[in-house]
Image: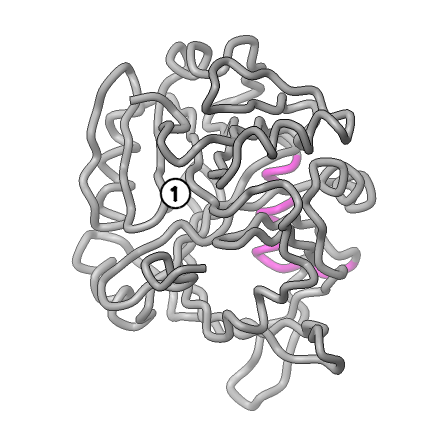
Amino acid sequence: MTASEPQTPSGEQIFLDHVGWFVPDMDAAHAAFEKLGLPMTPFTVHTNEQADGSRVPSGTANRCAMIRRGYLEVLVSVPDVDTAIARQLRTGLSRYTGLHLVAFTVGDADATVERLQGAGFQPDPPIALRRPMPLDDGGEGTAAFSVIRFPDGAMDEGRIQILTQDTPDIVWQPSVTADENGLDMLSGILLCVADPSEASARYARFVGRRADFSGGVYRIKLDRGLVAICGFDACRELLPGVRIPDLPFMPAVSIRSADIDRTAADLAGRGVPIDRPDAGRVIVPPEAGMGAAFIFHDGGVPPFGE
């Protein structure tokens, strides 16, 4: 990682931090991600830290696929734990298996809460999340996050949140970071919605950045990463043959590759079905991506067109 592309933001920067899948079967998801060349972290049951230092189950558990900048999260519900977060996961999963979560990262959670309030949102106070994490040099560390969540209905597209990465050196352990396939940055998320104009204006306020429109797609460029928003027809043009089960829907994630030929060869060698529409992109269909298409792209090629 170079100094010009840090893992976490500073000042008023905002990055696309990670995206998340809701799945019914973690074993199946683990196998799918490993086949894509994305090693996963150990299975972790989530807890929330209370004011007295105690921890209570949140109702979900995860495994993550780490890349050099950003990561992919896969979530399942925990049996016999009934919380708002667990109910949200089960509701999303009843609509479709696939992408339901987008998380942005900032340097200052409290300042971001104030900005969001000024932009017309009603964020909950930041929640201190703690996760045990094995360390490459032995022992166990604690991954720490401060997460800003929102009341139900604030963002219809799924679980949309903003966080601070308080322990990035613990979260991005080299042993679980993909390095054989050339991938180096989570670069974008595609949202398909009924009213792209409304959604793009709302997300622009949410992240504090401008939405630009061309070719039927709104694009919001962050300090690192991109949010692309489109309607049904434009989604079908971007991803020919895509099955749209319901709206809103998150049909695709994009990941930048430092060596797209190496990425293509790695995927083909693993038996992953790929489409290569041009020299700068490789597309993996949703059937191989737990309900979401993967768009791997060269740094000079926009993942969702221009």
* Apparent side of residue 250 relative to residue 162 in the rendered image (left or right): right
Q: Residue at coordinates 58% horizontally, 88% vertically from top-left? A: 53
* Apparent side of residue 264 relative to residue 193 in the rendered image (left or right): right
Depicted 284 relative to depicted 26: above or below: above
Depicted 262 relative to depicted 282: above or below: below
Residue 279 picture location, percent across and down = 48, 19
Q: Residue at coordinates 42% horizontally, 25% vertically from top-left? A: 192
* Apparent side of residue 218 relative to residue 139 in the rendered image (left or right): left
What residue does disc 1 label?
155
Q: Residue at coordinates 49% horizontally, 28% vertically from top-left? A: 249
Residue 18 picture location, percent across and down = 50, 50
Nearest the viewer among 289 and 272 is 272
Residue 272 picture location, percent across and down = 72, 25
Q: For residue 148, say whether it is visible.
A: no
Q: Which residues are magenta?
A: 80-93
Q: For residue 253, say whether it is visible.
A: yes
Q: What amino acid is at disc 1?
A: Met
Residue 151 picture location, percent across and down = 41, 54
* Apparent side of residue 271 relative to residue 51 in the rendered image (left or right): right
In the picture, the quarter occupied by the C terminus is: top left
Depicted 119 relative to depicted 133: above or below: above
